[in-house]
Every structure is written in structure tokens, then in C-alpha cells.
Amino acid sequence: MYKYLTPILLALFVIGFSSRAEAQQNQQNPPYTIGVGLMYGTEIEQLGIRVDGYYTINPDIRAGVGLGYFFPDDFIGGDRKWFDLDLNGNYFVYSEESLSIYGLAGLNIAFLTIDFDGIDSETETEIGLNLGAGVEYNVNFANLFGEVRLGGIGSDADQLVLAAGLRFGL
């Protein structure tokens, strides 16, 4: 998983030093947003669903919480279930009328359960860091977003996560 860390850090460095327009507090970056979407994890190799909520602190920074659930898969004679809780901050490095690009950093708490055909189950909780980047595009009724993040850095639940969905202003 760490082989993805260098390209992500390099991309954030380049984006961070590129020219950027001043963000405006408008429908693109409302004070509160709630989002829904799909995601894919490279370690579990499954699709999942996610819900997130963000609070815009100022035109450049927002903080939020995300919940992700990967669909169960077969794993060593049982079902593996993976649930993520993410506490992230976003820093907007570029923002104009309809397009925003941001860096992402935060904390990932992964809850992993393996259920061995209803006979026995094993549960594990892993805590790691998140690091990534995202883009949002305003489509009038919502913001279409895409994110790439390395989640669970420093834990046994590290994986590259690709996500896309919609965020609605409140």
C-alpha cells in the first residue's frame, strides 16, 4: 500500500504550489454539506457505499466525518465485513465558480469482522491515517465529487480507496 503514498504526496505538493483562485462562500462551498457515493477498496477488493457530512470552517478549510461500508466478501471460509469511520479535513488548493480541488488528511478507524459460517466470528479494529486528494464539480443541484485516498496508513487495514458521488448543500 505504501507504493501509492509517494505519488499522492507528490500530487498534493504540486497542486498546493500551483496558482489558485480565491474560494467563494456560495452554493459550491455551502456551510454544511451531506454526501452519498460509491467507493472501491484495493485491499478488500470490493465496492462499498459511503455517506459523509462536512462543515466549511472558512473558504479554504472544511472538516467532516464519513461512514463507509464495503459489501461483504468470501474470506477463508467465512464472510469478511469492513466498515470505515473517517474524520477528515480538506484544504482547498484551487477553487473557481464550478470546480474545486482539495487535499485530504485525517484519521481512519476500520472495523473488520470475519464471520465463519455463523459458528464463530472474529472482530478487529484498526486505527490509521488518511491522506489523499479530491475534486468537486458543481452541477447546479449538487457537487459531483471524486476522491482518491490512502486510508489506514500505519495500520493493518491500509488500502487505496477510490470514491465518487454527490454532495448536497444544506
Image (cartoon, rainbow, N blue to C red):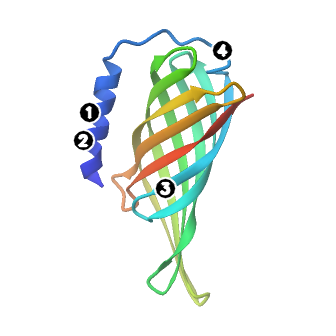
Q: Which residue is mark 4?
A: 26
The kind of secondary structure element at disc 4 is: loop
Residue type, numbered disc 2? Thr
Which badge, 3 or 4, comes first in the chain's sequence? Answer: 4
Which badge, 1 or 3, comes first in the chain's sequence? Answer: 1
Residue type, numbered disc 4? Asn
Q: CA distance from mark 1 to mark 2?
A: 6 Å
Q: Residue at x 67, y 21 (%)?
A: 30
Q: Which residue is mark 3?
A: 40
Which badge, 3 or 2, comes first in the chain's sequence? Answer: 2
Whether pointer 1 and pointer 2 mark residues with C-beta atoms closer than 8 Å, the reply is: yes
The percent position of residue 156, horizontal first and vertical second, equals: 36, 62
Q: Residues within 10 Å of mark 4 (few under 14, many from 20)?
A: few
Q: Residue 6, which numbered label?
A: 2
Which badge, 1 or 4, comes first in the chain's sequence? Answer: 1
Q: CA distance from mark 3 to mark 2?
A: 20 Å
Residue type, numbered disc 3? Tyr
In the drawing, does residue 107 fall left or right of residue 66?
left
Which badge, 2 or 4, comes first in the chain's sequence? Answer: 2
Q: Nearer the viewer, mark 3 or mark 2?
A: 3
Residue type, numbered disc 1? Leu
Q: Residue 10, which numbered label?
A: 1
Q: If the image is split into quadrants, where does the N terminus sit? A: bottom left
Q: Residue at x 58, y 11 (%)?
A: 24
Above or below: residue 111 compared with residue 106: below
The percent position of residue 63, horizontal first and vertical second, equals: 56, 31
Q: CA distance from mark 1 to mark 4?
A: 30 Å
In the drawing, does residue 9 fall left or right of residue 85?
left
Q: CA distance from mark 2 to mark 4?
A: 34 Å
Q: CA distance from mark 1 to mark 3?
A: 22 Å
